[in-house]
Amino acid sequence: MTEAVLNDLLRRVTESGLLDDVQIDEDSVIGVGHLDAAGVEVEVDLDPELEDEETPDLDAIMAGLKDVLSVSEDRWRAIVEEIASDIEDALDDGELDADVDLRTDLEAIGVGVFADAIIVVFAGETSFPDALVHVQLTPELEIEDIEIIGDEDEDDDED
């Protein structure tokens, strides 16, 4: 069943033309997509959560992929503004260089799409040189959670 689900997802993504270099990678389908509103290419991971779902909702995954890649520029700016404001509010004074504007420093580099959520991964070259910002969005592209994951956090996960 796992192979059939992944092959079906691969076929759907390929036929949609939304991603380039599409392939199966372990339990997900990966490729490269263009996030129009941000003007960047992003690595995309479509995860049907085969270990958790008997019958994954591939329609929801495809809808999430289409929605995030084609989000309007206005909505994208609002998402980035909310991310920047939330991070600024959460960090103590001095934890973030006052000269850095997160609104322009954060750049989307990856997208993970699940049936019930979308994760956008941002790099902040100046603000977070050793970390990535993971933003969980609802299927309606509303921010649900923001997490800054540094190299030391990833090392902890491997223990």
Image (spheres, rainbow, N blue to C red):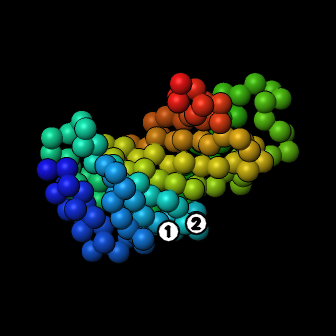
Q: Residue at x 30, y 72 (%)?
A: 14
Q: Residue at x 71, y 28 (%)?
A: 91
Q: Say whether residue 30 is left or right of residue 122.
A: left
Q: Residue at x 47, y 66 (%)?
A: 32
Q: Most extreme residue toward the front, as rendered? A: 159
Looking at the picture, does residue 142 appear above or below residue 60?
above
Q: Are marks 1 and 2 in contact (CB under 8 Å)?
A: yes
- Residue type beneath disc 2: Val
Find numbered disc 1 in the image and state the secondary structure of the residue it sits on: strand
Find numbered disc 2 in the image and state the secondary structure of the residue it sits on: strand
Q: Which residue is mark 1?
A: 34
Percent position of residue 151, x then y: 65, 36
The quadrant holding residue 94 is: top right
Decide if residue 42 is in sight here. Answer: yes
Labelled disc at residue 103: none
- In-front residue for pair 105/79: 105
